[in-house]
Amino acid sequence: TDLRPLDILSEVVPTSGLARGMRVFQVQGVRGFQLAASRPRALGFPASRLFIHCDRFPEEFSIIVTLRVLSVPAKRNEYVFTLMAEESPSVLVGLRYAPDKLHFLFWSQEHAGGWQTRVTFPNVSLSDNQWHTLVLAVSGQSFSLTVDCSLPKDVVVETPFPASLSVKRASFYLGNRRRRKGVFTGLLRQLVLLPGADATPRICTAMNFKVATLSVPAVLQDLPVKPASNEVLKYPYETDTKVTLGSRPPCTKQEKAQFWFNASRRGLYLCNGSAWISMLEVKQRLDYLEEYQNLVTNSETMGVEVFTIPKVGLFAATANRYTPPGSAIYKWTDGKFVPYQNIPTYQAQSWKYFTIGKKIFLAVANFEQNDRGQEFSVIYKWSRRKEKFITYQRITTHSARDWEAFVIEGEAFLAVVNHREGNNHNIDSVIYRWNPRTGLFETNQTIPTSGAYDWEFFTIGPYSFLAVANTFNGTSTKIYSHIYIWLSGSFQLFQSILTFGAADWEVFSIRDRVFLAVANSHSYDSGMPAPSNFYAINSSIYELNITAQMFVKFQDLLTYSALDWEFFSVGDDSFLVVANSFDGFTFSVNSIIYRWQGYEGFVAAHHLPTVGCRDWEAFHTVEGSYLLYSSAKEPLSKVLKLKTT
């Protein structure tokens, strides 16, 4: 063999159209075959069409399958494919699915008296109406199954796969074993045999692991968003069509091929699986920004959180320095933020909005003790009856700077950044897990941090990550910040990156590329000569290198005591805005919007006058798109409106 992928699925599809018993469906923006049970033999072809020069099945190989499984009854088995000799009812090679199990079948004449061997992979749950890609690697007695590029499941059996399995007068059958019973009822998108190699490294390079592709029939491949001509589709397919009105809805693989009508701009958009493509409107481009609202705050604002409560409205929570009067929540009313609720806080640093099921929460990170000398950060819960946030749970923290909320494998977590305890900056920050039984957050894991400022959670494929911005270890700001990966029920160190008073991490994607930007605030080391300027320092953008399995530096940008990054998009353009807070002489410093310029990286596009800028938030309403910045040096935040052409 020359290790060429052998596309079993494509062999069943004639060049003139679809085989009888096959229909094409598009679900969640991805196409697949639905197979009929009435004509199982019509979904077969001689093995000699694949094995042209040799009539032996490979001794070592991988099978790659992309499928969408419907719920299967408890005692039912469904066949993904079989290889069967014409004169025998026995399965030479086959793959079948049962609820929460996957069975690989093979026939070995030399071993086990000519009986069929079954290799079972337990706890393989595919019946969730989602697309999944499986890679089954076979070598001798070793069998390995990888689902959606997660950790492989390995099985070793006594009977090895035969070294010389004849395929003379044998045929492949798609989704059946030459009988109506056990026909595959889901959707099948990819079925490839790769001789002589483990296909996992070739498959697990795409960003969407669930539909990773090695070889897919032409009928199932994506068509251009706009047809090149008025020709009739060669391969018609069935799908649900839906038109959404109102503000911009999400556009993911699940919404692919759905439409959105933007009434305010009279534009019709089509979701391509990652972004809304304009069908009837010229692309928007950012022209300039105008001052839209001066938001007077209770006191200087250390952070701001913009969020939407369904069926209630858009809100902004400001983390204000002084108590009284504490921090405030504002509601977007008639195109402006107006005061809505005051909450007692103690030198609040940040807010975090999150939901668990139907419950709505808002957590504040308090930096100082309350009037009774107690140091708590507080989780508030939205009361639908009072339409206010009310105290829900107090958690002991130590000069808390930030909260991060996230979900892993269906479980909710909340992580707090503890900055220091007294004069000791090298303390533990804590990750809490939601206990559904008690309805409270409970300590799950502690992670050592050094004067930390920020947590940033993100996912890449099936993997979950948590990055911490370490700022100061007691003697220096030149210290390592860390990225952790979730493995076996806890976060474990993945990568360490040297930072300089790191105050914020921001993760974002541009097409299939994943970036991580750090805001470096100042360079100080008690054991080194003082630099000419502690605060004029590069902040860095890192890009994920999938081959190296690590983030590598992509670009340095000169910043002035940077405290925050915020990523946003306008039309097809991507932007990063930095919160520059102090240049060593004054707090009146321009914060910069950088535009993504492809090969050039991020290039400065707009210079925004700010005073002690601490935080940026981008948000959208039916009236347009906005940026909100908070000032840590004056009781005034500003809303800027993005003007587009």
Image (cartoon, helix red, strand yellow):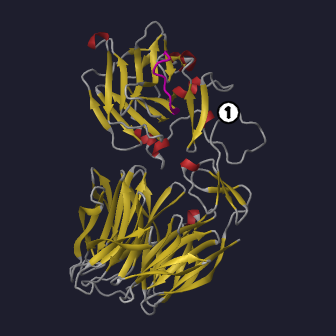
Q: Give the residue at mark 1.
A: 235
Which corner quadrant of the image does residue 107 belong to?
Answer: top left
278 or 320, which lies in front? 320
Residue 251: horizontal and vertical position, in percent?
A: 57, 54
For the C terminus, the quadrant is bottom right
Q: How many marks?
A: 1
Residue 512 higher or lower than 320, as above or below: above
From the viewer's perspective, is 307 left or right of 451?
Answer: right
Q: Secondary structure at mark 1?
A: loop
Q: Residue at x 73, y 45 (%)?
A: 227
Residue 385: horizontal and vertical position, in percent?
A: 44, 69
Q: Which residues are magenta?
A: 178-189
Callout 1: few (<14), some (14-19), or many (20+) C-alpha neighbours within 10 Å?
few
Residue 76: horizontal and vertical position, in percent?
A: 40, 25
Is residue 180 within the magenta segment?
yes
Is residue 470 within the magenta segment?
no
Q: Is residue 4 visible?
A: no
Residue 171 higher or lower than 286, as above or below: above
448 or 400, which lies in front? 400
From the viewer's perspective, is 426 left or right of 480?
Answer: left
Q: Which amino acid type is shown beneath numbered disc 1?
A: Tyr
Q: Residue at x 74, y 57 (%)?
A: 280
Q: Residue at x 58, y 44 (%)?
A: 29
Residue 470: horizontal and vertical position, in percent?
A: 31, 72
175 or 138, which lies in front? 175
* Residue furthest front in the image: 385
